Amino acid sequence: MTADKIHYRRGYKYQLRREWRVQTSVVDCSAKISSYVELWPDGVLIVRAGYAWDGASGPTIDSRSSMRGSLAHDALYQLMREGLIPGSWRGEADRMLYDLCVADGMWPARARLWLWAVRNFGGPSAARRESRDSVAP
């Protein structure tokens, strides 16, 4: 016998295959989302295998140079959305997106455009909100 409904989330395109750690400037915060995302007080962000994210948002395309930046950015925004770190860290998350994209070979002009876009339009994605779970049928 199976349950008559499933609970799921939409909007994810990628799933991390191996754990990834990166130093952030988000310090003096400690947060954890299930077993997938953890932020240590020294600023180390750990994203574990199985974490799903949607890559770059908006009218753009994903590229190799945007993958690490979008992963870190999405994980940090999720910590803010869930109220686990203050929204005052949003600017640092946005700057990290820019820095990682440039480090990975994105043209600086494109990365600056992305930074401008997340600064001007990303607020709702970082704002505290309830789950986006969906139910079917």
Image (spheres, rainbow, N blue to C red):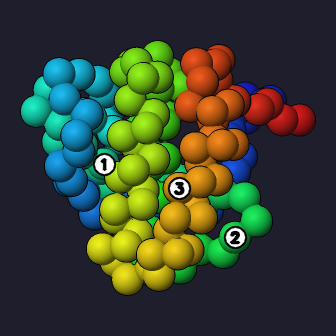
Q: Tell me the residue at 84%/35% (across/down).
A: 136
Q: Which label lies toward us, 2 or 3?
A: 3
- Which mark is nearer the camera, 2 or 1? 2
Q: For this view, does 64 lie left or right of residue 26?
A: right
Residue nearer the viewer, 15 or 65: 65
Whether pointer 2 and pointer 3 mark residues with C-beta atoms closer than 8 Å, the reply is: no
Q: Label for residue 60?
A: 2
Given the image, on which type of amino acid does mark 3 rest?
A: Leu
Percent x, y of residue 99:
34, 62
Picture quadrant where residue 62 is located: bottom right
The image position of residue 33, as x and y in percent, is: 38, 29
Judging by the rendered image, the residue that carries numbered circle 3 is 115
For the residue pair 29 and 49, the one nearer the viewer reads as 29
Question: Which residue has dot 1 on it?
Answer: 47
Q: CA distance from mark 1 to mark 3?
A: 22 Å
- On screen, 48 above or below 109? above
- Real-space Cα separation, disc 2 to disc 3, in angstroms: 13 Å
In the displayed structure image, the side of residue 34 where residue 43 appears, left or right = left
Lower sequence index among marks 2 and 1 = 1
- Residue 63 can be seen in this image: yes
Which callout, 1 or 3, points to the residue nearer the camera? 3
Q: Residue 18: image x %, image y %?
A: 28, 63
**Which mark, residue 38?**
none
Q: In the current view of this chain or complex, which residue is farthest to the left?
A: 42
Q: Secondary structure at mark 1?
A: strand
Q: Amino acid at mark 1?
A: Val
Element type at marker 2?
Answer: loop
Q: Position of residue 92 (x, y in %)?
A: 36, 40
The part of the image, by quadrant, that contains residue 105 is bottom left
